[in-house]
Amino acid sequence: MSFSSQIKASAAFRPQHDDECDAMLYGLILFSNKFAADELSFRTENAEVSDIFCGLLLGVLDIYASPRIHDKQNGTIFKINLNGGDVLKKIAEKYAVLGYNKIDRSLIASERQMHAFLRGAFLSCGYINPPERSYRLEFSVKDADLAVDLALVLSECVNVMPKLSARKTDQIIYYRDSDLIIDFLNLIGMTSASFEVMNCQIEKEIRNNVNRKNNFDVANIERKTDTSVAQIEAITALIKSGEFDKLPVGLRTTAKLRMKYPDMSLEAIGKAEDPPLSKSQVSKRLKQIMEIYKNK
């Protein structure tokens, strides 16, 4: 079972209050595969979602529905189609007062109703990426006006307007920020899933910090190696040209240590001097040698 399916299975539970049940069913219906005057078609790959949809239909509207189960190569599909006149009239009287492409705010007036409604919408048309891959929460909506309405509701709950795009004939509403996805999961009651995303977020940050440190260390080593190679080349050239013996004794001593220990740090070279020198003193001497080499 995919990460998104696991979350949906966990989120497919009946709310405590009747007004929340009304709002959740509204979200399930409004964002179903088809909601129109002549047909309501709901499809899901999740048995738990199919069960909660049928259970809410019965509990809220006293409508009995049973899914048709289709086994496909890539999984099972649960289809619930309602097209009887009396049944659709009952649904329309409660959930289509403003039409089929607009959210009736009177049905989601309170915060808990709004959260229940968004849980229903997520179960109906939502998807969330496995957090170890990339952060993405999206809703696939058939109607452009309805997509905008849903985006506005989300922005009120999460405090950030989601992004919108098109995919074939659907409108896609999505967030790609892990913190916003965590906020959404918390508000629809999926605390355990939000912790999973949060843990993955922490692991990624730790891994990125380790990679950054490793990259910095590698770059630092390469920089020191390049500097040491340049110093040795300069000293070798001075020896070949006979200029080396003309250097002050201190510079010659430091140069010989660099030649003998090409990988040694400046601090270690300073300790090997007699008397010992500081790191800055060793660095100054080697810079003087480089200047003499460049100006010879």
Image (cartoon, rainbow, N blue to C red):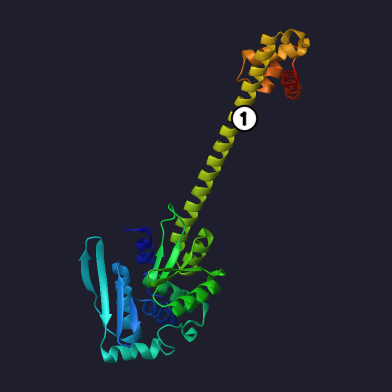
User: Where does residue 143 sit, x and y in percent of width and height?
Assistant: 41, 78
In the rendered image, the quadrant that contains the N terminus is bottom left
Q: Is residue 46 above or below residue 84?
A: above
Q: How many marks?
A: 1
Q: Residue at x 31, y 76 (%)?
A: 42
Element under disc 1: helix
Q: Is residue 293 above or below residue 204?
A: above
In this image, 260 relative to 206: left or right?
A: right
Report the front residue among 112 and 217. 217
Residue that numbered label 1 is attached to? 223
Find residue 98 and report its image quarter: bottom left
User: Where does residue 56 sit, x and y in percent of width and height?
Assistant: 34, 79
In this image, 239 relative to 116: left or right?
A: right
Report the front residue among 232 and 213. 232
User: Where does residue 243 sit, x and y in percent of width and height?
Assistant: 73, 10
User: Which amino acid lies under the numbered mark 1 shown in the image of this protein?
Assistant: Arg
Q: Residues within 10 Å of mark 1 (few under 14, many from 20)?
A: few
User: Where does residue 6 sit, x and y in percent of width and height?
Assistant: 36, 61
Is residue 273 in sight in this rendering?
no
Q: Residue at x 40, y 86 (%)?
A: 95
In the rendered image, the quadrant that contains the C terminus is top right
Is residue 125 in sight in this rendering?
yes
Q: Residue at x 33, y 90 (%)?
A: 90
Find residue 286 and report its image quarter: top right
Report the front residue among 180 and 114. 180
